[in-house]
Image (cartoon, rainbow, N blue to C red):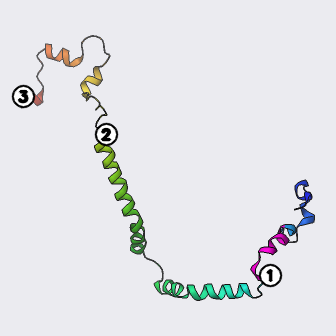
Amino acid sequence: MSPEWNKGSRKQLSDELGRDMELASALELLDPERSDPGYWMRFRSRVMRLAGPELARRRLMGEPSLPDVVMSWSRAVVPAAMLAAALAGIVLLRDHAVPQPATVGVEELLVAGVQGSTIPAELERTQVAFASESF
């Protein structure tokens, strides 16, 4: 490419569609139609001939319904979910060294850090009868 490309004078090197003409001329060497006229027409007809049965099958299928879409997804999602569950099971069964957190009751959490006697301690000292205890 010419050194003008880096200097900002790109307008001189491009055509009305904005293509870089120097790059286009360099890429023309790779065009198979340069040495074989009619290459792209033969290529298109070969691709359309080979894709014909699949295109006909898709045309006959019509619009996919919701169950069709779910079934197509399930082919990929179900094995991936089974693999993830198996890996999670292996990790959980293998890792026994993790200490379990100590369980703490709600009452203990409510009175943690409270100085002096708490309400349940005061209630134990006095004789208070609740309706739920007497019935």
Residue beneath disc 2? 95
Left or right of 50: which side holds 134? left
Choose between 127 and 49: the one closer to the eye: 49
Q: Secondary structure at mark 2?
A: loop
Q: Is residue 7 magenta?
A: no
* Location of residue 120 (image quadrant): top left
User: Where residue 31 appears, x then y in whole percent?
Assistant: 77, 77
Q: Mark 2 belongs to which amino acid?
A: Asp
Badge 1 vs badge 2, beta-carbon distance below 8 Å: no
What is the CA distance from the residue labelled 2 to the residue labelled 3? 49 Å
Frontmost of labels 1 and 2 is 1
Q: Nearer the viewer, mark 3 or mark 1?
A: 1
Residue 31 covered by magenta stretch: yes
Q: Which residue is mark 3?
A: 134
* Of pointers 2 and 3, the one earlier in the residue sequence: 2
| Relative to 131, residue 36 above or below | below
Query: What is the spatial separation of the Cα atoms under label 3 and label 1, in whole angstroms?
Result: 103 Å
- Tell me what residue is drawn at x 30 percent, y 34 percent: 97
Dominant secondary structure of the residues highlighted in magenta in the image: helix
SS type, badge 1? helix
In the image as oriented, which residue stretches furthest toward the front?
Answer: 35
Residue 12: x and y, percent? 93, 65
The vertical placement of 13 against 45, above or below, is above
What amino acid does circle 1 point to?
Answer: Arg
Q: Amino acid at mark 3?
A: Ser
Q: Which structural element holds mark 3?
A: helix
Circle 1 crowding by C-alpha within 10 Å: few under 14, some 14–19, many from 20: few
Residue 58, horizontal then vertical, whole percent:
50, 83
Q: Which mark is residue 34?
A: 1
* Range covered by the magenta-colored residues: 23-33
Q: Quadrant of residue 91?
A: top left
